[in-house]
Image (tube, grey):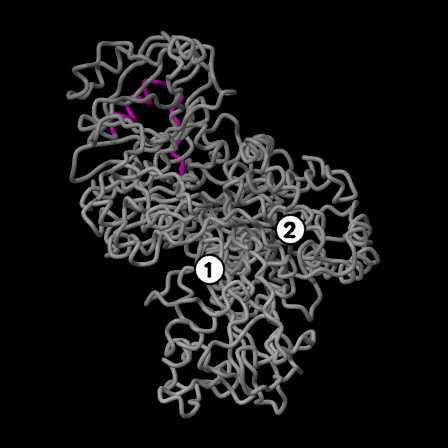
Amino acid sequence: MTDSQPTDLRASARELHDAGLCVLPIKADGSKKPAVSWMDYKVERTTPEQHDSWFGSDRPRGIAVVYGAVSSNVELIEFEGLALREGLLDAATEVMEASGLGEPWAAILSGWVTESPSGGRHYRVRVEGGDVPGNTKLASRLAREDEYTEADRQRLRERPTARIVRVLIETRGEGGYGLVEPSGGTVHATGRPYVRLEGGPGSIPVLDADTMAAVRDVCRMLDQLPQPEAPKTAPRPAPARPDGTLRPGDDFEARADWADILNGVFRPIHTRGSETYWGWADGVGGVKATTGRDEHDRLFVFATGSEFQSEVPYSKFGAYALLNHGGDHKAAARELARQGYGSRHLAAVGAPRPTPAPAPESPDVDETPADDDQEEQGPKEDEGGRGGFDYATTFGLPASVRTPFDYRVTGRGVEVLSASNENWLRVTFAPLVITATFEDPEGDQYVELSWIDRSLGRPRRISRIVSRETAKRGRKLIETLGSAGLPAVEGDARAVEKWLAEFESDNVGRIPSEQLARWLGWQDDGTFVSSPEDGIKVDTPFEEQRGPARAHARKGTLDGWRGTVAQLEGFPVPRVAVAAALAAPLLKPLGLNSFTLDISSRSTKGKTTALQVALSVWADPSEHASAMSNWRTTLYAIEKRLNLVRGLVTVFDETMAVTDDTLIDEVLYQLPMNHGKARSGGAFGNMLPWETILLSSGERPALSFTTSQGAAARILGTTIAPFGDGGGAVAAAAREGVLANHGHAGPAFIQYILSGLAKPNGREGLKEKHRALVDEFRGGGDMTNRRAPMVAVLAFAEALACRIGLLPYEPLPHDVWRSLFTAHNPTDNRPDMALDVLREYLAAHSHELFTATRKAMNEKPPYSGWLGVLGTDKDTGAAEVALLPQRVGKVLAEAGYSLDAVIGSWVDAGYLKTLKSQRPAHLVPRRFDGARAKCLVFTPEGMPFGDQDEAA
């Protein structure tokens, strides 16, 4: 609830003094300097008599508060307007919530909040149990050249090496002061006033010193200034060796994972974009460190109490050396070399291997080409010789592949010659070989094992991909692939692992080597895998992901798809869905989190078809394919489905099919975090990562499933029927068209994006264009501003696709985007739902309304007091309902709603009367039962009550 903002400086000084704050007068010349000598007032609070002398005349002045001990340990946190425009407040909120600081942070955001003339936000906290630090700059960044002022340019002319910095987040603490409302006019250089947005001096939240320190630490982690690196903590990569191999430290830097390095010291708490936030491993306290802040992926620790220096960048090798070898880089390099680091060649993953010399001709080698139908192909038995088994026909391997000495492979399996050379010992019950080796972009290696299975009565080839580590450990291999029918038993585990090692060693250069992807979309090396048809092997970590991965396939032609979507030109909602499918790969280069686009309406006019058209950008949208999912599932299944993609769209249809409303609530909350829930035990599947735009549809808006006040900022939604009242024929044609033509537009679009990113400053250029659109879509409300980056990326994707001719129509005008996704969009639904709750309550408690009839009958107030007054509108004569805001807030709170969260929407929708002379304007005075009170006065549209006689 916002306290009324005093318009009189004297009244403001009295309000501030009553809240225990030290007040200062400010010059009205734009300098923001105190109008009096104020050094004494850092330790001694000013008095009401001084306030009367300072603010009693007509002389223009501003008013400020001195922070720190003199004002009962109050501290100010300021987010500059630039920080808000660049999303730092949202970023801080996400990290606070993920690190256990959500409740105190929410108290700060809903306490005393002021908007500065430059568009920033001032938040106050009363610190308990510790001192308030002095003024501190928590987060800054280097200014862009287009932001330079003339003073900045002059400074650079004088000192070319100077850094031009823009402060993003800072505090005013001990010995500092800050201007407050109602300062305005010439007090600030802009001429604009300070405005109260929430609460007032009497509603400053109280936090203990440790919690406040954790809040500052999170804000400090948003700092974007480059930090100097020291050889001790982040040694520079050495030049490549002449033989093309990497040194152990450089190899470790490229392949190691921070989670493994920091195990036992830190635990991951939250991931936002490429940046991960870490807390102590024992779970005590909030965020203590970050990684992935920039392309160097350094570790920054912001707390004391660990081996690391505070706010010093550490490379992976530097951190490993410190934690395991006391900072001895030579000892660390020796140990890494012993573990196998440093032996990888620098050749690109998936690069063509040297063609081996043809094997000598042998009558034992069958040169017959392999049959394409491997399921039906049985092995060609041959009892002896190095080439004896027909690997080409049976497994599709090159004809030059041979059997190692002392082994033989037949249709009965693999056998090894005994030590006495007198008999053959069984290793497997069927032919088992390595048919391919893989390396993923992180440098992890895998092998594809293939064997012949006859369990169905006919020979068929089965293939599975496992890590090289698993292939080298026989028992683990048999345990992993036993359920898939691996033809070996645990007693032969050592013999199996030795056979596979001998087979691969004997056929180096003959066994195909390929690149491997474990998911679709952006890979860690910057490549993008749109489909298993891209020529890169896709092996998903979960069986449930195989079907959706295969559904990302191509059919028909790109021209056929273009002809289909050309019919959508007059239908904005399906076009927005298509734009979302194209926008998904832009999230990573733009540094945006995943979000939801929800299409809901109570009609059957094409919601599912709109999602199918969007999905056809990348995949088969038919019902029998697995790319389109349904809300009737489990949370873990949804996380696995999301985990399949890093930059592709995900579709979930029919919200009404959900069996538990809290599932949608959980997904909407978790999706922007870009990872799944932490699960106990650290089992595989813990905190599954993703990057996606989730498309959802249903008769009921997704937001109606959640009670979270912040959910609206993570969702774009529309209740407009996708194909309107007369678009049934277009919807049917669109559906048939995308079923026949799909999977072409997305790969074509990503090729265009990749070519742009490859240019000098390509990524920054992309971000700059997106930032311009974000500014275009910002509005007067906080919700509009928080949604602006999401709306901008959709509009940006459509504009790019139209520019290159991928979409055969002109981009939607910006006014259309604004009309679909405004601050108080109907899709939020929460304001209307809250109003419905209030209407129902009023219908059951109308006896608690004061009326003229009750006054005439001298009725006493009900036990709970009057709810409000039922009177008559002076202009129209219609019944007018005026309710006490305290009672309304209590009614809504019991139903899970916040009055503050919906009041703006009620005003915008015309449900409440307003008076410009009032602060705030929606609290209108009404007199009843001998008293005068500020009420929420509803219009007939907001609270219809008939005429007064009927109401009585």
**Who is closer to the viewer here, 436 or 30?**
436
How crowded pointer 1 is (Cα within 10 Å; few <14, some 14-19, many 20+) is rated as: some
With 761 as the anchor, is 161 left or right in this view? left
Number of marks in the image?
Answer: 2
Membership of 8 in magenta stretch: yes
| CB contact under 8 Å: marks 2 and 1 | no
When the figure is inspected, residue 20 is found, relative to residue 518, above or below; the finding is: above
**Who is closer to the viewer here, 31 or 493?**
493
Magenta stretch: give its range. Answer: 1-18
Query: SS at mark 2?
Result: helix
Identify the mark at residue 727; answer none if there is no mark.
none
**Who is closer to the viewer here, 33 or 502?**
502
Q: Which residue is mark 2?
A: 581
* Residue 633 x, y percent position in the rendering: 54, 70
With 280 as the anchor, is 662 left or right in this view? right
* Residue 805 x, y percent position in the rendering: 76, 41
Which amino acid, mark 2?
A: Ala
N-terminal label among 2 and 1: 2
Membership of 447 in magenta stretch: no
Q: Which residue is mark 1?
A: 666
When the figure is inspected, residue 869 is found, relative to residue 81, above or below; the finding is: below
* Residue 707 can be seen in this image: no
**Residue 442 picture quarter:** bottom left
